[in-house]
Amino acid sequence: MAMFKDGEQVLNIEGFKLGEFDISAEGFYKNVQSFPFKVKKRKVINIKVVADGVPVDVAVANEKGSSVFHKQAVREGTLGPIPTDENKEMGIVIGIYPGDRATVSLDIRMEKP
């Protein structure tokens, strides 16, 4: 996909694990991970998600903590374009159901609308 290759990379995380046992986590399993990232005003972001195992839920939040995008049951795909509006920082939240496990890779790129 040509539009995805040209954007500026703002976050790239390969192979992080969701659903692993963690005695310090609430419920003893790490089912939700969040990652902040910096953006520029009046741009759009595209998010490439690859999850092996079970599908994951993806949410993107703005600086105020409000959800600007949400998609359930993503196994693989490119999500977006999602406008950054006037935000300088955003965050992505990835989650799965308790008892499920997945290895997830994310690539978030920013470009002009």
Image (tube, grey):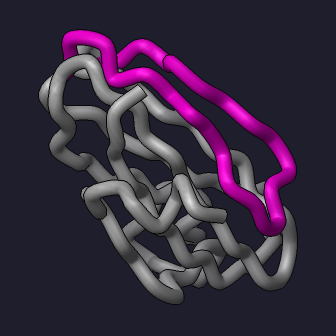
Farthest residue in the bottom direction? Answer: 15
Residue 73 lies, in percent from the top left, at 86, 51
Residues in magenta, as a range: 65-87
Q: Is residue 45 left or right of residue 56?
A: left
Residue name at image x 72 percent, y 75 percent: 51
Which image quadrant for residue 50? bottom right
Q: Is residue 6 above or below residue 52?
A: above
Residue 3 lies, in percent from the top left, at 54, 53
Q: Is residue 56 above or below residue 110?
A: below
Question: Is residue 70 on the magenta stretch?
Answer: yes
Residue 22 visible in image: yes
Q: Is residue 110 left or right of residue 92?
A: left
Q: Is residue 52 left or right of residue 83?
A: right
Q: Which of the two residues, 24 or 11, is positioned nearer the viewer here?
A: 11
Residue name at image x 53 percent, y 68 percent: 30
Q: Is residue 56 left or right of residue 82?
A: right
Residue 66 lies, in percent from the top left, at 42, 13
